[in-house]
Amino acid sequence: MVALLRGRLSALGIKVVAAEEYAAPNVITFELTRHLSSEVVGKRLEKEGYYLSYRSSYLLKRNWLQICLMGEYDQRVIDAFPPILASCLA
């Protein structure tokens, strides 16, 4: 699941921070380009129903967002995420 989502993010041109072999098993951290704000994108995603980690000073300083797949989740919601993220980045 996480590997598939990482691949979909990479296909969108999104830079995933940690290589898969070093990453936490259920966490994907990705970096936005300079012209995008992780705070703005995070708020856009919240309006779409996706609550990512981005509010800590550590993440904001680096312009990073984190997807944390903990507990139960709906596969359809995960599958729908990449195009929604792409629209929030536009």
Image (cartoon, helix red, strand yellow):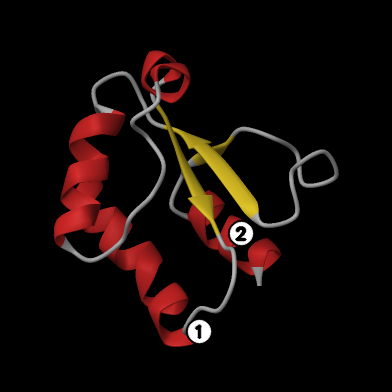
Residue of label 1: 75
The answer to whether the residues at label 2 and label 1 have Cβ atoms under 8 Å apart is: no
> Is 13 situated left or right of 42 in this image?
right
Q: Residue at x 32, y 66 (%)?
A: 83
Residue 6 placement (x, y as % from top left): 60, 56
As drawn, the residue found furthest toward the right would be: 21
As drawn, the residue found furthest toward the top would be: 61
Residue of label 2: 7
Q: Secondary structure at mark 1?
A: helix
Residue 29 placement (x, y as % from top left): 55, 40
Residue 40 placement (x, y as % from top left): 18, 35
Position of 6 relative to 35 (above/below): below
Residue 79, located in which quarter of the rendered image? bottom left
Residue 42 placement (x, y as % from top left): 27, 43
Instruction: Answer few, some or many: residues within 10 Å of disc 2's Cα (few below 14, many 20 plus, some between 14 and 19).
Output: some
Q: Residue at x 33, y 55 (%)?
A: 51
Please give the count of numbered marks on the rendered protein. 2
> Is 6 situated left or right of 35 in this image?
right
Q: Residue at x 24, y 66 (%)?
A: 49
Position of 67 relative to 29 (above/below): below
Front residue of 43 and 19: 43
Three-letter residue code for mark 2 = Gly
Q: Quadrant of the N terminus?
A: bottom right
> Is 2 situated left or right of 45 in this image?
right
Q: Secondary structure at mark 2?
A: helix
Q: CA distance from mark 2 to mark 1?
A: 16 Å
Three-letter residue code for mark 1 = Gln
Q: Earlier in the sequence, mark 2 or mark 1?
A: 2
Tell me, for residue 28, which label it has, or none: none
Q: Residue at x 41, y 42 (%)?
A: 53
Of badges 2 and 1, nearer the viewer stands: 1
As drawn, the residue found furthest toward the front would be: 71
